[in-house]
Amino acid sequence: MHDTLTPVQARDMLSAVARHLVANVDMLTQVDQAIGDGDHGIGMRRGFSAVEEAMASTEPVSVSAVFKAAGTAIMAKTGGAAGAIFGTMFRSGSAAFDGQAVLNAEGFAGFLALGLEGVEKRGAAKPGQKTMIDALAPAATAAKTAIARGLVEVVKEATDAAKGGVEATKDMIATTGKARTLGERSLGHPDPGAVSMSLILEAMRDYIAA
Amino acid sequence: MAKPKKLLNNPVNVVTELIDGLVAASGGDLRRLDDRNAVVRTKLADDKVALLIGGGSGHEPMFPGFVGPNLADGAPCGEVFAAPTPDLVLDTLSAVDRGRGVLMVYGNYAGDNMNFDIAAELAEEAGIVTRTVRVWDDVAAAPLDRITDRRGIAGDFFVIKVAGGAAAELKDLDDVYRVAVKARDNTRSMGVALAAGSIPETGERTFELPEDEIEIGMGAHGEPGIARRKITDADAIAEEMTDRILADLPFSSGDEVALLVNNLGATTCMEMLIVARKVHQVLAKRGIAVHRTDVGSFLTCQEMAGLSITLMKLDDELKRYLDMPARSFAYSRS
């Protein structure tokens, strides 16, 4: 169990996140085939393989620097909407760690809050449109509420909230992105981006709880 | 449904390999940008407004097949069905900028919008002026009052052709932008899908369509259209699509138009011509004159069967740039 992460540990955590995403590529492909054009999994494989490489070569000078390097790798290699969105989340979110020697509960909650702000601005999207924001927004809220209980609980609560958000996207009609023209046909299927967001938090939770 | 047979090597390399082929076929007109997945013209006139086009790959010849004299100056190519990354867009627009700024023309998709926007912001920091025209010609994608929610499909070509002519002649980025916006605003399309295309890396089809059904208005990635039904004869389908396009702008008697009948990938030339014939009949009946007709593959979706119909309402200025000579892999006229 970790109540704070050093820059080296933050880097190792992001490597674990990258491996977790790459391990779930086939599942993400299947989720996207139901609602999109089926390329979300291979896009995430490009992006998070790049994160794994970037983490192997990044000097962990600060928590902020490793999160920013992860975001830059995603943005440079993923392509499509997913690359812009997940790259923006890590890059915007990394500002929460600026000047911080370690990653702690407050910093993690700030990462989700600033990441959410960046994504909403970049995608001109808001909660309820069946996107990754529907996993990220409840996670950010839950994390903020749990700050006093420490990092392990913050990440656990955020992950649970994101999973709840994924479930909620099944009842939403897509109103943005390629899936928006599905209309009611998008009902019953989770949003692939929300699933990816939940996987990212899941891997962070497992690293921090271990 | 069985996975389609395809002539591929490692599917991870499809974009790199198609660009190699395009450069080889260009007779020296095109080069690859360093080791990146982008093509640029080898000879760029100094003192020229640059035209950058681009998007996800898998839709060839769109976009890199329309890079050449009096067309686009460069095209960053994303992975299959995925927008190019901001740094690839930035590097390509930096390569084609000649100090008069860069007009970016691309299809209106969330991924393209975000990645090109990020690139435009980075370009601004680097002192390069850009303007953006997003093409939203697909009338089936959203009602007219939400036109900015519509997708860009084969109408991309008319906007690129007109913008390419304007960029070759006009010296001011804002003038080229104005002409490109006019081309976009006068262009409407609709597609019909008979069978799905597939993603090279997975071999999976992008959607399922029963053997005896078609979908009117389906998007170029298999996005749902406005009606799925049993297949009927070509004339009925062509007439319905043309009527919906005409009602949208609207086009009216006395108008002069350019017509594009675009193959989504696997439809025969015979079927394309049968539909082109019917569209001409419908337009003649409505008193609409066809200035020029293009029939062929402009924006495809792998082995997707089906076609789209595009009309652009013309004025003298649009006609001038549409009729200018041009040369590229996918489109040449003298």
Image (cartoon, coloured by chain):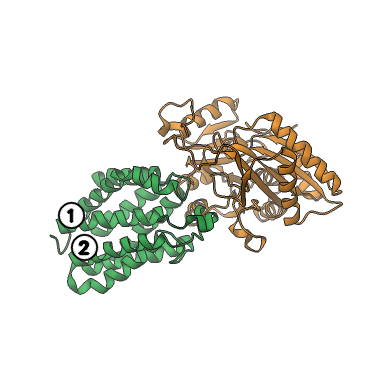
Which quadrant would the C terminus of chain B be assigned to in this image? top right
Q: Determine the residue located farthest toward the left in the rendered image.
A: A1
In the rendering, at what x and y percent does residue B68 appear? Answer: 63, 35
Task: List the residue tagged with mark 2.
Answer: A103
Residue under mark 1: which chain is it in?
A
Where, by quadrant of the figure, is residue B71 drawn? Answer: top right
Q: Colour of chain B?
A: orange
Secondary element at image label 1 = helix
Task: List the residue tagged with mark 1.
Answer: A9
Q: Colour of chain A?
A: green
Marks 1/2: CA–CA distance: 9 Å
Callouts 1 and 2 in the same chain:
yes
- Nearest to the observer: residue B174 or residue A181: A181
- Nearest to the observer: residue A190 or residue B228: B228
For the image shown, how many numbered marks are present on the structure? 2
In the figure, A139 relative to B277: above or below? below
In the rendering, at what x and y percent does residue B258 appear? Answer: 76, 44
> Is residue A26 shown left or right of residue A120?
left
Q: Amino acid at mark 2?
A: Leu
Where, by quadrant of the figure, is residue B293 drawn? Answer: top right
Q: What is the crowding at mark 1: few (fewer than 14 residues within 10 Å), some, or many (at least 20)? A: some
- CB contact under 8 Å: marks 1 and 2: yes
Give the number of the disc on residue B213.
none
Residue under mark 2: which chain is it in?
A
In the figure, A176 relative to B1: above or below? below
> Is residue A51 shown left or right of residue B330?
left
Q: Is residue B41 visible?
A: yes
